[in-house]
Amino acid sequence: MNDLRFALRQLRNLPDLLSRGAHARSRHRHEHRYFQFNTGPFPARGLPFSEPERVVRIYGESKERDLKQMPSSVPKFWHYRDGQTVFSSIAADWGNGFIMTGSGEPIQLLGGNVTANYFELLGIHPILGRNFLPEEESKGDVVMVTENFWRKRFASDPTILGHNITLNGMPTTIIGVLPNLPISWFGRDSEIFANKPFEPSGITKDRLMRGVSFMRVTARLKPGVSVSQAQAAMPALFQSYKEQHPETADNTWSPYLVSAAEDVTGDLRPAFLTLLAAVSAVLLIACSNVANLLLVRFTGRKREIALRMALGAERRGIVRFIRFRKHAGQRDRRHDWIGFGALDGVGRSEIGWSKRSARKRSKTAIARAHFHAGAISHYWPAHGPLPGVAKLARRSGRWA
């Protein structure tokens, strides 16, 4: 209890030091939160897919023209889907916009067209309804909407399944509600996903079969197959595509694989590392500021510690006193300075000797106490232990 009383008194007398330490700690905390916010949910927690480490993108590249991340055409996607042996499933999508009419003012919506197995490949399951069926890739007009669309446009109506909406002038049936999707993968404000991925508007079937490229191909590796192993199998698959489709425009784009994590972060990884280094530097600055404050504080207590030694405190007690003050702030910021409780009434202090035993101390110790009288008057007010020490010294005749 003596230690606690002394700590509270010290806390009351050091508002500036506590406020500076709290400010440095708060600044580092804000920097850490800023880093987490700007790097987004992906670097910290990963994509919300089933086994995202097995999900890859298949892009094309033309080394002669220095082109990368080229999309795929419908013939190439079909060839990869039917001829590959390293993927458990392969799907495709492409971004699209929709105009919804029939409910007041026309509303522009963002989304895309996907193959029937797209969300199943990613491991995303609807919270209401079902996924697309394979036969719906070429017939029927059905869509899946996101949870945000469902809550905002339909007020979370549980009877939304089977509801007809008009998209781009075509009556379309809602068959499922998807959970909110990660922005890093689907983009911001994606709300509508439709079927018929091989029938883009404005492109004739003849042009489509000549290799017009607009689809992003996504695949899931078979269990036990690494990205490098799958990449090693792609040249043979691409060579057979070139032989079967020599007239297509994309038969010179060799395929390469990119993991889902790398595809999301892309060239931002160096920026993330730079930001991490900056936040670490701020942490070091905050730690150095607090360390300097503590160093200045303990430097100013040299006379106090010398007085404690003069009055009989053991070295072990002084070390314990300093360690208490060092680790107290880690336990509770309200008790940043937990003292030793020494000299509080002298007879009940942690130094381990009372007024009665003090009278039997050597005259040398009393003289040393007299030498450090200035330290006593500086560190303890009149209502503290000073009267006890002064009275003790006067009784010995050593204190004027």
Image (cartoon, rainbow, N blue to C red):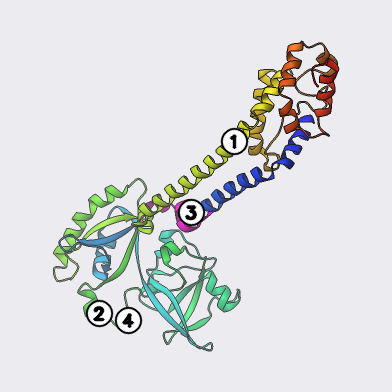
Q: Give whichever of discs 3 and 2 has the lower sequence position.
A: 3
Give the secondary structure at mark 4: loop
- What whole-number distance in Å separates the C-alpha atoms at marks 1 and 4? 73 Å
Q: Is residue 22 above or below residue 241?
A: above
* Between 232 and 18, the one nearer to me in the picture: 18
Extent of the magenta region:
33-56
Q: Name the residue under label 3.
A: 35
Q: Name the residue under label 4.
A: 201
Q: Give whichever of discs 3 and 4 has the lower sequence position.
A: 3
Amino acid carrying label 1: it is Val
- What whole-number distance in Å separates the C-alpha atoms at marks 3 and 2? 48 Å
Single out the mark in the foreground, 4 or 2. Answer: 4
Single out the mark in the foreground, 1 or 2. Answer: 1
- What whole-number distance in Å separates the C-alpha atoms at marks 3 and 1? 32 Å
Residue at 76% from the left image edge and 38% from the top image edge: 9
Which mark identifies residue 205? 2
Q: In which quarter of the image is residue 335?
A: top right
Q: Dot 3, crowdedness within 10 Å: few (<14), some or many (≥20)?
A: some
Residue at 14% from the left image edge and 63% from the top image edge: 243
Give the secondary structure at mark 3: helix
Q: Provide residue 29's location: percent of width, then percent of height.
A: 56, 50
Residue 48 seen anywhere in this rendered image of the structure: no
Q: Give whichever of discs 1 and 4 has the lower sequence position.
A: 4
Does 380 sit left or right of 36 as displayed?
Answer: right
Amino acid carrying label 3: it is Phe
Q: Name the residue under label 1.
A: 296
